[in-house]
Image (cartoon, grey):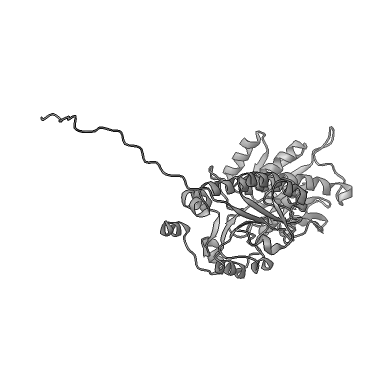
Amino acid sequence: MSKPIISGSFSYETLEETLDIKTKDADLFIGIPKETAFQENRIGLIPEAVGVLVANGHDVWIESKAGEGSGYSDHDYSDAGAKIKYDKQEIFNCDILVKSAPIVESDMSLLKLNQVVISPIHLSVLKAEILEHMMDKKITGISFENLKDDSGTYPIVRSMSEIAGSASMLIAGHYLSASGKGKGILLGGISGIPPTKVIILGAGVVGEFAARAALAMGASVKVFDNNVYRLKRLQDTLGHRVWTSVIEPRILAKQLKTCEIAVGALSSENGRTPMVVSEAMVANMRPGSVIIDVSVDRGGCFETSEITTHEKPIIIKHGVIHYCVPNIPSGYSRTASHAVSNVLMPLLLKVSNEGGLDEYVWKNLNIRNSIYMFKGALTNFHLSERFKLKYTDLNLLMASLG
């Protein structure tokens, strides 16, 4: 074989490696309006989060008194670097809207072309006209409920479920007392007196945190769920053996008959929550016992449930107190706002670091799960089916843009 020829006339030099040049950070223009619908007291970004965004060069405008429901004043936000605005239209002129309640009819005329809206979606009150108007305005919509993190979980939904589960026991404890129109029973129990009996329907996050709170107070807890894996996981997570069962009507009716508190925490992937407690079962419960139906925003687990408000939170049927407020976390708005803000502030910083939302969506698959509308194209299949609107696959849309 011939040997390679090496000549002094050749110049041997290392070549520089070609690196991908990072996209220039995008400057974000963020608006936070004051919510007037759905008894919403939460706010999407707390002052500390606004301070971080402003320190990173972003503009944040907030409507006056938008943070009052969560205990934050205009002064708190101005100190953090936000600009306080008194005209809602000015807030809606921002490129990115961060709302703690969904878009409603009164917001439609204020939306601007090519805006990004980060907010929850309340399926029970969503209307086709609102979606059609957003499509005409070429809005990009990101929903709280479907925001997914790198671990594949839904951080905002989980946080709100943790609050609702823990709060359900605090609420039940109040309504068991004589001042709450209850039987005058202390939730839990003391030495020499049998513990309060708590029935929890659902072994998800709400059920888990309701069980944690009840056990911590000394109550006797029994959990029902048709998903045996969830029941097993609940036992492992609690580190405490609790009574569990699949939902069998006769067993459930027998347990409800002697309980003081029943919590409805069943969930449904799509559509209505399964109604597993009939009116006859409720009629056989002890007078003065308490039902907390956390699932009422999706129809409720109890046949006797009716949506109530924070101002008038209870109704009494068959002598049983029903607490059926659909937005329990809003009653603990400061904690809930902090939890939401912990997710949205890092998200906005990542969007900026990638050079804008389009670049971030292109590179990050998790965010695509939460986008129900992209530049006016409806990308959520369930919404398109429900409202008979044209559906566009977001992955195909991104591929065509790329």
Residue closer to the observer: 56 or 314: 56
Residue appearing at x 64%, y 68% in the figure:
108
Q: Going by the image, does 4 lie left or right of 91?
A: left
Residue closer to the observer: 41 or 354: 354
Visible residue check, residue 269: yes
Residue 51: x and y in percent read: 67, 45
Farthest residue toward the right? 179
Q: Going by the image, does 281 lie left or right of 116?
A: right
Visible residue check, residue 258: no
Quadrant containing the N terminus in the rendered view: top left
Q: Going by the image, does 152 lie left or right of 292?
A: left
**Image height of 362 relative to 5, above or below:** below
Residue 176: x and y in percent read: 83, 47
**Image height of 86 relative to 254, above or below:** below
Quadrant containing the C terminus in the rendered view: bottom left
Residue 266: x and y in percent read: 65, 51
Farthest residue toward the front? 9
Farthest residue toward the left? 1
**Image height of 128 relative to 327, above or below:** below
Residue 308: x and y in percent read: 77, 59
Count of residue discs: 0
